[in-house]
Image (cartoon, grey):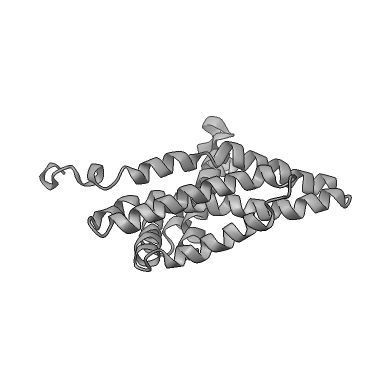
Amino acid sequence: LLTPVAKAFLTDRGLDAAVLGQQVFGGHGFIREWGAEQLVRDVRIAQIYEGTNGIQALDLMGRKTVRSGGQLFKVFADDVNAFVAEHEGNSALAEFLEPVKYGMGLLTDATEFVVAGSKENPDLINAAAVDYLDLFGYVAYAYMWARMVEVALGGVEGGEADFYGAKLTLARFYLSKLFPKVDALSKSIKGGAEPVMALEEALF
């Protein structure tokens, strides 16, 4: 289930990071002397190595999620929900668990929406695929951050405050500045297939 997420979500974000790095140089970012433009061109191929990331999204949404009736997704959801339940009373972890719970609610709702709706309209699978993969990626990454924070909290107390403190800072940055994209992705998925399929073929 997570193979297309690992392949596509991370390589998409990798290109984003490389382009942002190029922007640091301003107009000089396009000059070979600094190497930034080469990094952008090199990392771009990661998105097309194994069928393109769009195909990875179709694999996740169609073959892995809808074809299994959501059962493969349930395995992942059970794992995440068990982690949340296990640490429910941990006040130090609470600020990191709440986004995970919220994201899992959106992801579960989106999964059920597409699995059920695609029975009547198969176009919904393709229309939702890319947004669904991104939504899945942001939620899965929030879950990974929560697991890292669990370790980091112990590390800070154990005397490695700088290293593990940085982990906590990055986790808070991710959850406050990047994770909120889940709301827009959820709304886009709920927009259905009609806007995607509305334009007549002849108008292309």
Please tell me which residue is depicted at 29% across the width and 54% down the height of the picture.
Answer: 117
Rendering quarter of residue 120: bottom left
Left or right placement of residue 184 versus residue 100 in this view? left
Residue at the extreme right of the image, as rendered: 159
Residue at the extreme left of the image, as rendered: 202
Left or right placement of residue 81 versus residue 66 in this view? right
| Residue 42, visible in the rendered structure | no
In percent of width and height, residue 198 lies at 18, 43
Q: Quadrant of the C terminus?
A: top left
| Up/down of 110 relative to 34, above or below | below
Left or right placement of residue 122 versus residue 87 in this view? left
Please tell me which residue is depicted at 43% across the width and 67% down the height of the picture.
Answer: 71
Please tell me which residue is depicted at 60% across the width and 53% down the height of the picture.
Answer: 143
In percent of width and height, residue 177 lies at 58, 36
Residue at the extreme top of the image, as rendered: 26
Rendering quarter of residue 121: bottom left
Please tell me which residue is depicted at 79% across the width and 48% down the height of the picture.
Answer: 163
The one of 192 and 83 positioned closer to us in this rendering: 83
The one of 132 and 90 positioned closer to us in this rendering: 90
In percent of width and height, residue 192 lies at 29, 46
In percent of width and height, residue 20 lies at 54, 39
Left or right placement of residue 194 versus residue 10 in this view? left
Give the tally of numbered discs. 0
| Residue 193, visible in the rendered structure | yes
